[in-house]
Image: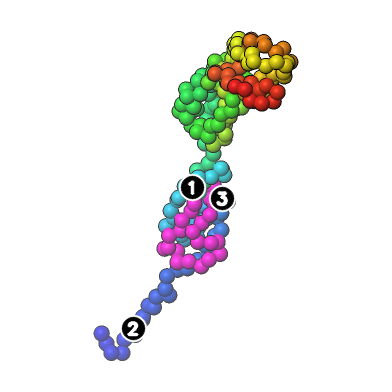
Amino acid sequence: IDVNSTIVLYISSGKVKEKVPDVEGKSYNDAVSALNAKGFKTITKVVEESKEEKDKVLRQSVSGGTELDTTQEIVLYVSEGVVRENMPNVLGMTVENAKKTLSDAGFNNVTTTEVESSQAKGTVYAQNLAANTQYDVTTQVVLSVSMGPKVTKKVTIELPTNTSDAYQLIIKLGGETIVTENIEAGTPSITVDMVGRGSMDYEVLIEGIHYK
């Protein structure tokens, strides 16, 4: 090169920086378009559980207005959206079968409550969400489960015969008083109709004192 030749030097101005646009609340596609328009091409999508609209940007890794090298990565956290499924009809099923049917349909937030019913014990008598209707799968499903039909059982209770005076007899079933009666001295027994379920545990009190 001639010593008198002109040499032109090109000096780098450094990496290109731009202000990151605020894309929170936008759809993912609109957010990407806005970022690309500013030169940001390295964009990562992360889906998060949310009831917001599907693919809505919930937050971004770099806040809007921040100056950033356009080659840097920007992470967009987007909503997976609400998952809705058809509610099955589980009336008349056993609790176990009803829960399995609901789980298979995507509903796992299930609670039960016992109710008076003539249906068989453990049978689903009612459900709080209408069948054949779509619901968010996280919605709580409440199943009203039958305690079973009540039965009437005649119970003969032996009484003390060594008393010389009449006395007050009280009989309680499940904590509830079902008989209050004055008994003549020497009465050997009393037969009572008990209405309930299962073993029907009862308590007998004579003059307010536990007898059996």
Q: Amino acid at mark 2?
A: Ile
For the residues labelled 1 and 3, the Cα–Cα distance comes to 15 Å
Q: Residue at x 60, y 11 (%)?
A: 156
Q: Secondary structure at mark 2?
A: loop
The magenta segment: 56-77
For the residues labelled 1 and 2, the Cα–Cα distance comes to 56 Å
Residue 22 in which image quadrant:
bottom right
Q: Residue at x 33, y 83 (%)?
A: 7
Task: Depth check: give the residue in front, 10 or 169.
Answer: 169
Picture coordinates of residue 104, whole percent (x, y):
45, 28
Picture coordinates of residue 103, whole percent (x, y):
47, 30
Q: How many neighbours does mark 1 have within 10 angstroms: few (below 14), some (14-19), or many (20 or more)? A: some
Q: Amino acid at mark 3?
A: Lys
Q: Residue at x 67, y 21 (%)?
A: 206
Residue under numbered circle 2: 7
Q: Secondary structure at mark 3?
A: loop
Identify the disc placed on residue 105.
none
Q: Nearer the viewer, mark 1 or mark 2?
A: 1
Kindly tell me whether residue 178 is visible in this rendering: no
Label whose residue precedes the other's in the sequence (1 or 2): 2
Q: Nearer the viewer, mark 1 or mark 3?
A: 1
Label whose residue precedes the other's in the sequence (1 or 3): 3
Residue under numbered circle 3: 26
